[in-house]
Amino acid sequence: MNKKTKSIALNILGILVLYAALSTLIGSGAINNYLSNILITICITIIMTASLNVTTGLLGQLALGHAGFMAIGAYVSALLTKSLSISFGLSLPLSLMLGGLAAAMCGLLIGIPALRLEGDYLAIITLGFGEIIRVIIENLSITGGARGLTRITRLSRAFSQDRTLSMVIAFTLVFFITVLIISSIFTLGRSRHGRAIISIRENAIAAEATGIPTTRYKLLAFVFAAFYAGIAGGLFAHQISIIDAKMFGFNKSIEYLVMVVLGGMGSITGSVVASIVLVALPEVLRGMEEYRLLIYSFLLILMMLFRPSGLLGTREFSMLAAWEAMERFCSRVFKRKDTPTRMPFQPRYDIWEDKPVLETRDLGIDFGGLKAAEDINIHLSDNEIVGMIGPNGAGKTTVFNLLTGVYAPTRGEIMLLGKSIHGRAPHQITHDGIARTFQNIRLFNSMSALDNVKVAFHSRMRYSPLSGILRNASCLSEERGIDIRARELLRVFQMESDADTIAGSLPYGRQRKLEICRALASNPKVLLLDEPAAGMNPSETAELMQTIKLIRDRFSVAILLIEHDMRLVMGICERIYVLNYGRIIAHGSPEEIRSNPEVIAAYLGQPQSVQEAAHAES
Amino acid sequence: MKKRSLFTMLVAAALLLSTFVPGLAEDVIKIGGIGVLSGKYGMYGLAVKEGVDLYVKQVNAAGGVLGKQVEVYWEDTQGNASEAINAYFKLSEQGMVAYIGAVLSGESKALAEVTAEDGAPQISPSATDYDVTTGRPNVFRTCFLDPFQAKAMADFIANEGLKSVAVLYDNSNDYSLGLFEAFKAQSEKNGLSVVAAESAAFGDTDYKTQLTTIMNAKPEAVFLPYYGADAALILAQANELGLNAKFFGADGIADIVELISDKNLLTSLIYTDHFSEGAQSEAAQKFVADYQAEYGKLPSISFSATGYDAAQVLLNAIEAAGSTEPDAIVAAIKATNSTVVSGNITFDDHNDPVKSIFFQTFDSKGNKQFILQVDP
């Protein structure tokens, strides 16, 4: 804690010293008009790059039209300050805000259809968007058409007759807007919303299965990035006082993207450093202007060869503690007194007596002409461990995907706690009480084990993105609560010591455990385990059996597991369903299954004991 | 980590150092030259630069201005408005007396934004957009404007005895649109009938639909307010379709020579220019000779002449003002009435020059042929 406080103080101090030094130098004339303008350009570039990094780095979606949002912000705010007849000190903040909101609005409009797509498609749509904005601006009369807007009030001249003083005020304004925006990206990134966004980058399918409404969070990140780009655009317009649509073309978007890539996708401080270097460098080498893009490309190639993940990769510089500082500051300002830690995780212990927790009725799905599953009737009661076995391709994972809403059933119904889950999205079903693990582990690899678990607590938390940015009382108390819960959960699985380890670097068996742990964090009533013992050695498998029993006892949850390891299935399952060709061919206790001739035939094509069949498989 | 911070520090140090570079001795008059010197439009800026440098060299050889030598500091904008502003901020820290530039209309407007705040004298040799000087008492130019040349062309066509005219223009391009509107108005005033006005979008490469419509309207003249690259395509396609008419263009079409493969097509094209190598006046002929001696080529881009003129107007004004005070220089420029290489020049209320216009065509080898100089 002591160390933390120290680094918080250092960060705040660093920012203030930097500001004091720069503003004094501007005030004294040592940094002249020309250099001050470069400083302001650097700040604007930092906002652009960092906000693009939210989409590209944190969310992991390639966007090629970021300059389009900048254009919207620039035009909206410039038109406002030109037309409003109130003092510039009032109209500027107002117009910046409205410019940002207009850009965010466009982000929303294009994001809703575009973010359902992924990867290349999003890139192409955003590319198109950037160009459309440019063409629209060029053809409207209010934006001055191809001639652009001129005579926009200039920041560096607007505040005072005295040029130096006016420049100092302009610089102060831009500097602190930049600091605020960067800190807000940091604090948002560390809130539950940030975790949700990063989890989408790490593994979108797992994120959805963990209860993250992925479409909504993609949209949130996208709209946020657009909002900040809009503000940067507003500042840009008032810095250079003349704008035309060509300034915000494809090349501009690419320039910012290059900075993000050079700085490291996902590293906000990397973006800051890259912006500073790439704005300052061409000014120093002004004679080499025409080679600027060449230098960029060359840097990019070098970077890809020697540091493919960018200057800082996804790591952050020492700003590490700035958000904590904000937290201290905000708690002092906004909080009346210490709010008690709110425990977000309220286990459901409602008794379902004899009625099944989960039940399917004549469930079936067709893929084209193929009946992948038909007449699936299974039921699970409270605290039950049920196995599902069958040869490869029997349709076991298909059933799981039906239960979790990844596939919509062609026929039949799924009842969870007596209610149909028909038409619910995967993340909603997770919320309703079905959690799952995957056949091939899907963790959020570059996040810590603790954060992996925290992502799954998402739907139990309430605080808004805004309180996440401000780190106000409700955010802090919930975050404290979730931290306790997440560590508790890890402790149950003896993984407490791995809390801060990056998930991807955990040993295989522990990754399996962590995935189960994460599934449990969403407080399920039904836990679906897809081949939990796959790839485990006998001693790991034995440990896993203990773990599964422990889960049932401690978490009051019904477990349905797919497994090929017959020792595990026969050892812990109370009942077993056998699937073949998409149908249930047998159902009963392990003993009954072991001696069922149909099962034996399905596995080996001839009558033989299942033990031998199992032996042959493993 | 170490290396990175060292690198940033080096950059910062270099930035700081550049501010402390000592200015040259005070017995030099410093002129800032700002404009596009590289990239797609670089040739226009370079033509301006050659013209300006030539005049400054001649003046310095003859003893300079106010007894001092003149030095021009050039900054490349890459045709980018924000770079033009940056360039101004950089130069203004170094004690420039006045500015020549910028070259393109967009960057010139941006430059005018900032020179106007300081009242610094600015002369653009080549910004033809009307707005550049609007409300800017300190900003002048030595080239004529788009409406002016469009009107002159409409008059020229009427004087040739042609009766019907068609226009093909680019409605997303400022330059093209401005020329079209002024041309149409003046044609109607002159009793020319505009039988077809077809527009194409920016970046189109196939103009056959529009040309077919134009052909069906059977015009005697076709006005093409385009830059050379597009005009080269249009002329070739018109020829393919068998469109028989005289073609007319404005100053931007001049670079068509290098871009068209069949130079024969050029013989049917007449365009307006700021200057002609074939101009008859004594000043013009001396300029062409001097330019050829200095650079070993003809001043084929007319902005070298307007650049030469801009330098002449500016330095004469400084000499006349007897000081390097911005206001005195501006007043002296405003009072200009002198003969420069592109004709006689005075400035109107809008700080636009009242000056000569040149009509040119090409021979079948693509050499420019002087037709006519029209004086105000």
Image (cartoon, coloured by chain):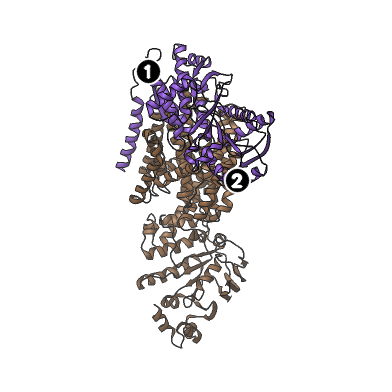
Residue A52: % across, % down? 48, 45
**Image quadrant containing the N terminus of chain B:** top left
Q: Is residue A425 left or right of residue B51?
A: right
Q: CA distance from mark 1 to mark 2?
A: 55 Å
**Image quadrant containing the C terminus of chain B:** top right
Comparing A465 with B376, the one in front is B376
Give the residue type that dot 2 points to: Gly
Instruction: State which quadrant residue A3 falls in.
Output: top left
Residue A457: % across, % down? 50, 56
Tag 1–tag 2 contact (CB < 8 Å): no
The brown chain is: A
Q: Is residue B256 left or right of residue B187?
A: left
Comparing A30 with B359, the one in front is B359
- Is residue A539 visible to us here? yes
Comparing A598 with A151, the one in front is A151
Q: Label 2 belongs to which residue?
A: B242
The purple chain is: B
Q: Label 1 belongs to which residue?
A: B60
Label 2: how many Cα within 10 Å (few below 14, some 14–19, many 20+): few
Asked whether the residues under marks 1 and 2 belong to the same chain, the reply is yes
